[in-house]
Structures are given as structure tokens and as C-alpha cells.
Image (cartoon, grey):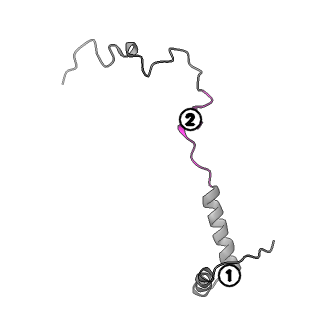
Amino acid sequence: MQTLTLKIPDDLNMQLQYAVETLHTPKSELVRAAVADYLKRKLKKKKPSMYDLVKDDYGYMEGPGDLSYNPKYMEGFGQTKRPFKI
């Protein structure tokens, strides 16, 4: 196990000392647990974005590239051949 020496502010040292006395745990053990928890949360793999999920398939399909803004592709959209009955 490696040794680490660090300086901490007085108020943080007082909090650490309080935790040591309250939890009956060695200071080094508390600091190791705190660092491990911090790193686990910070380095936790983030959820992939939608782009990350589909980037390998992007551009795979063929078809017009302007579906999102060309009104001619929207002609008849939402219309049915028979009337909807309630």
C-alpha cells in the first residue's frame, strides 16, 4: 500500500476528526473510503447519447435527405382512406 501525504484546511480536519471519533474508524480508512467513493462517482461511465447509440448506422439507409423540411413528403400525412369511427 502506498503512502499519501496531503494538507487539508483546519475546518475539514476538524470534521474528519469528528467522524473518526463518532464512527470509531481510523482516519486513513475514512479517507480511503471517501476517495474511493468520490472517484467511483466521478469516473462512473456516463449513459450514451442517442447519437452514440446510432452513429454506426447513420447514413446506412437510402432515401431523400430532406424529409424534415420538404413539404411534398408531408402530403397526405395523417389522412386515412376511410373515416375514423368513434
Most distant residue in the right direction: 2
Residue at position x 68%, y 83% in the image? 26
Residue pointed to by mark 2: 51
Picture coordinates of residue 7, whole percent (x, y): 71, 78
Which amino acid, mark 1? Lys
Q: Quadrant of residue 21?
A: bottom right
Which amino acid, mark 2? Tyr
Q: Residues within 10 Å of mark 2 (few under 14, many from 20)?
A: few
Whole-number angstrom distance, CA of label 1 to CA of label 2: 45 Å
Residue 26, placed above or below residue 76: below
Picture coordinates of residue 58, whole percent (x, y): 58, 26
Picture coordinates of residue 81, whole percent (x, y): 27, 11
Q: Secondary structure at mark 1?
A: helix
Earlier sequence position, callout 1 versus callout 2: 1
Viewer-closest of 36 and 10 = 10
Residue pointed to by mark 1: 27
Quarter that holds the N terminus: bottom right
Question: Is residue 82 located in the magenta-colored stretch of the structure?
Answer: no
Residue 82, placed above or below residue 17: above
Residue at position x 40%, y 14% in the image? 73
Residue 84, placed above or below residue 36: above
User: Looking at the magenta stretch, what is its main secondary structure?
Assistant: loop
Residue at position x 64%, y 60% in the image? 40
Tell me the magenta residue range.
44-57
